[in-house]
Image: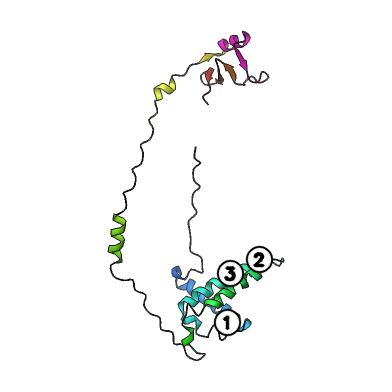
């Protein structure tokens, strides 16, 4: 029998998910990100790699937010010796510096002027019709199979043996308790196991 699936936990966007932040949440994240990025640029001498207008470049804001989240996760884990700090540099920080100009137009920006001009990323017209067409081409959901029919009448027609008759079978050697020391032990009789049904006050076959 398949175990029932555990109830799935509701997914909630984190505080770093710019797409879903309200005004208050966005203001708080901007404050944190500006402070952290200012420190990052000074600490790692990134003035030429991340120009002062970084906050005007949406892709860079997303990348730096993710980098800050990874940095926080690495550096806020107590004082024990571990490799999280090195991993942050090699797995997240350095790769970002290597690709940051590929995701931005920093080459056209200077320390005194931002030449960034975001282009609208409109989706080509007709996307709804396209999706409708490819979805409609898929097969309909499979019908739910009918529930199995249980023959209740047959289930109720269970052979029983009274306690006295089973005792006689044991005394005559026709039946044998699996554990003679246990009064509630199943009994092997007529090539099958029997258990005592307290509700029926008799022995019934145990179906395996």
Q: Nearer the viewer, residue 31 or 120?
A: 120
Q: Find numbered disc 2 in the image and state the secondary structure of the residue it sits on.
A: loop
Q: How is the image coloured?
A: rainbow
The tag on residue 154 is none
Q: Which residues are magenta?
A: 164-185
Q: Nearer the viewer, residue 29 or 157?
A: 157
Q: Residues within 10 Å of mark 2 (few under 14, many from 20)?
A: few
Q: At 52% from the left edge and 21% from the top edge, which residue is drawn?
A: 199
Residue 201 in view in this figure:
no
Q: Find numbered disc 1 in the image and state the secondary structure of the residue it sits on.
A: helix
The tag on residue 38 is 1
Q: Residues within 10 Å of mark 3 (few under 14, many from 20)?
A: some
Q: Find numbered disc 3 in the image and state the secondary structure of the residue it sits on.
A: helix
Residue for badge 2: 77
Q: Quadrant of residue 194?
A: top right
Mark 2 vs 1, N-terminal side: 1
Nearer to us of marks 2 and 3 is 3
Residue 39 sits above or below residue 5 on the image: below
Mark 1 vs 3, N-terminal side: 1
Q: At 53% from the left edge and 73% from the top edge, which residue is drawn?
A: 65
Marks 2 and 3: CB-CB under 8 Å? no
Q: Position of residue 156 (x, y in %)?
A: 43, 21
Mark 2 vs 3, N-terminal side: 3
* Distance CA(mark 2)–CA(mark 3): 12 Å
The tag on residue 70 is 3
Q: Quadrant of residue 162?
A: top right
Q: Position of residue 171 (x, y in %)?
A: 63, 9
């Amino acid at each position: 029998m398949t175990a029932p699936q555990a109830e799935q936990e509701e997914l909630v966007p984190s505080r770093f998910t710019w797409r879903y932040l309200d005004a208050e949440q966005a203001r708080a994240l901007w404050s944190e990100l500006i402070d952290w990025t200012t420190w990052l640029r000074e600490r790692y001498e990134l003035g030429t790699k991340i120009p002062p207008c970084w906050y005007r470049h949406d892709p860079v804001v997303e990348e730096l937010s993710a980098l800050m989240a990874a940095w926080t996760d690495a550096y806020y884990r107590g004082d024990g010796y571990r490799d999280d700090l090195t991993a942050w540099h090699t797995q997240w920080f350095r790769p970002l510096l290597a690709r940051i100009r590929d995701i931005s137009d920093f080459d056209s920006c200077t320390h005194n002027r931002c030449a960034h001009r975001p282009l609208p990323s409109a989706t080509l017209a007709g996307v709804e019709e396209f999706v409708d067409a490819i979805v409609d081409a898929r097969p309909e959901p499979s019908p739910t199979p009918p529930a199995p029919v249980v023959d209740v009448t047959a289930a109720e027609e269970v052979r029983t043996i009274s306690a006295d008759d089973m005792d006689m079978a044991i005394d005559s050697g026709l039946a044998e308790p699996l554990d003679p020391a246990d009064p509630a032990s199943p009994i092997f009789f007529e090539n099958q196991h029997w258990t005592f049904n307290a509700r029926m006050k008799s022995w019934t076959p145990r179906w395996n």
